[in-house]
Amino acid sequence: MATRSAPTTGRTKKKAPDGPAPRAPLTYAKSGVSIEEGDRFVDMIRRDVRRTHGPRVLDRPGGFAGLFRLDFNEKLFKRNYREPVLVACTDGVGTKVKIASDTGRYDTIGIDLVAMNVNDLIVEGAEPLFFLDYIAAHKIIPEQLAAVVKGISDGCRQAGAALIGGETAEMPGVYPEGEIDLAGFAVGVVELERATSRERVEPGDVVIGLESDGVHSNGYSLVRAVVKEAGLHLDKVYKDLDKSRTLGEVLLTPTRIYAKPIVALQRAYTVKKIVSGMAHITGSGLGDNLERALHPKVDAILDPSKWPVTPVFTFLQQHGSIDEDEMRRVFNMGIGYCLVVRPTFAASIATRLKRAGERPHLIGHIVKGSGKVRMTDRE
Amino acid sequence: MATRSAPTTGRTKKKAPDGPAPRAPLTYAKSGVSIEEGDRFVDMIRRDVRRTHGPRVLDRPGGFAGLFRLDFNEKLFKRNYREPVLVACTDGVGTKVKIASDTGRYDTIGIDLVAMNVNDLIVEGAEPLFFLDYIAAHKIIPEQLAAVVKGISDGCRQAGAALIGGETAEMPGVYPEGEIDLAGFAVGVVELERATSRERVEPGDVVIGLESDGVHSNGYSLVRAVVKEAGLHLDKVYKDLDKSRTLGEVLLTPTRIYAKPIVALQRAYTVKKIVSGMAHITGSGLGDNLERALHPKVDAILDPSKWPVTPVFTFLQQHGSIDEDEMRRVFNMGIGYCLVVRPTFAASIATRLKRAGERPHLIGHIVKGSGKVRMTDRE
């Protein structure tokens, strides 16, 4: 019953679009539904979806649900949980989806969708298991939506998650021409006693920041306002930003997925709980997000000189005449993920993460306080 | 660590709207984000969300993920799974959401969202565990979105699922004024050996159909085309349809959630596998959906005279001059859920379901065939 692949479940369900009023007698087809286009889309994405599946995904043709075995009784994969806690997230990609439609490039926005969900799962100490997506558009254009699903599939493989289900809805009555929206759902599992618990954070702990790959998925309304206000063009190369990539390509750079290195790190240290807390840096910047990893008796002191500011932020700041505090309130400013760790292990953890391909920096430390994040250049 | 409630995780994340271009210097607020409205919304929904939680939902303030214990070591709730298989679905409610916005009544569409997901989970033999939702709109109007979440919460309680997470995105750049879309995500669990497997269906099996509560969540593009074409009004009472409810109220009747009776039925018969297959009747009608419960060596013969056609379908058919075959291809025509069962148990299963509040009918039987559903009045 446990097979290596499963068909794309759920995608044969279509929500009929809200079409123009036809002459009587009325039929579904006249209401605007195209079953053929939907089927063509399913064929196009089948391989991308299957590439994300492992032996835990069960093949159940006919249903609309995805099935995933929690324990898999094979030596290679045996990871039994005594007290398994399921961890679940949902998130979209916000206004970044409009950069995709503005540039006509849909093949990476799916990576952002996975990242925004899976990066929140791993903060809880969880290992990602599977992912589902919901894509709604004015019109299902198979090539476009297949590109989106390819991106989701790429993101899932980066995260070690199986893409086990999805829904595609064509709704011209809700979405204007050319518009599309995406929602993602991720589920992971963590052993109850190893689940992240912010009470563990202590004065003396060190804050490690992992570099982001750009704007990631938050702040795009401000990004687009800058582009419009400053008369910038997404299809142009700006030498002070990037020597060869267009502004659109830089802005579309996918959100980095931190899952594999973080999950591997958790497995490397099974006895001691050396990671006190973690944070995924999303909307409202580094300060606000790191605060969520603290409890009311500690502060985090960060030194902005300890990590490089990604060029795209300097570029946006200059062209938008945005002040520094506003930049920090909106954007990640170069750090996409944080870990709060016991000081004795900070150096070895940073080394491990660097070997895993991350760019870690020792960006601050924990002191007694009141639950705040403070920047040394604002003290 | 296992507490009775958890805060609404995830809803403090907001995606900034795509606002008008402000004068420099640019700020996030000028881009159109209102943090206060978002916070007010979270306060309004807190109680509705908590009502769905049981002891398995873990309280983890600070994160964006919902946590749910799979095994709970308490006598009352101890349901250990030897080989647990997680079952996951995602779905939206399609064009029905426009009936909600047309009538301004948002408090039941959330029930549809839960139903569309949970009814697909139970088809696999699974018990629903938890639910998450994604709501995106032109503008977050707290009262409106709180009504939506109230509906989701009501649906979750009907389904026995915990509402453990959600995301709300305000995106005026994607959604025109007044528009909203919803996506839902449900996870359940089933014991591997009890998971539905359509190979079990045998000639001689009986098909039991459970009555629907109306249009449910499919076919609304045709519904709206009829309303428009025939000059009908959602705020009017049509005596031949319903003596007291308006057309809008009838059309908004929530999708019936079959979870509790079906899960209870599965538990009542633990040794024998007397349910061969099940189907949730959604898009493309009874025939297409029941076919998914069959395998290529059997047919299902259904007798349409064995169940009542809900008045709303007759009404739509007359006003839209829609022919019978088209009606059957689009709408559920009075049956919302089917079970294929061993003949010796058909009567006792039907009795059990009736006692649980359902309206079951013996609507057909299985014969040797080629995977088709056939109607006796079309033979």
Image (cartoon, coloured by chain):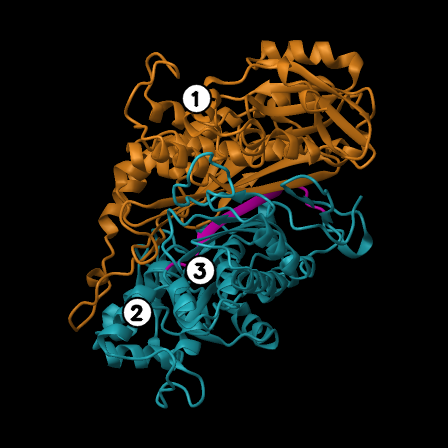
Chain colours: A orange, B cyan
Above or below for A209 versus B17? above
Q: Chain of mark 3?
A: B
Q: Quadrant of residue A181?
A: top left
For this rendering, which residue is in front, B284 or B102? B102
Query: CB under 8 Å between callouts 3 and 1?
Result: no
* Residue in the image at 83% along x and 23% along y: A203
Label 2 residue SS? helix
Crowding near pointer 2: few (<14 within 10 Å), some, many (20+)? many
Q: Amino acid under label 1?
A: Phe
- Predominant secondary structure, magenta span: strand
Q: Which residue is mark 1?
A: A315
Work out which residue is located at the far left of the displayed protein and give it.
A23
Q: How many marks?
A: 3
Q: Amino acid under label 3?
A: Ala
- Taking the magenta stretch, the answer to whether it contains residue A230 is no
Above or below for A9 versus B179? above
Crowding near pointer 3: few (<14 within 10 Å), some, many (20+)? many
* Residue in the image at 30% along x and 77% along y: B316
Q: Which mark is residue B224?
A: 2
Q: Start and end of the magenta stretch? A: B80-94
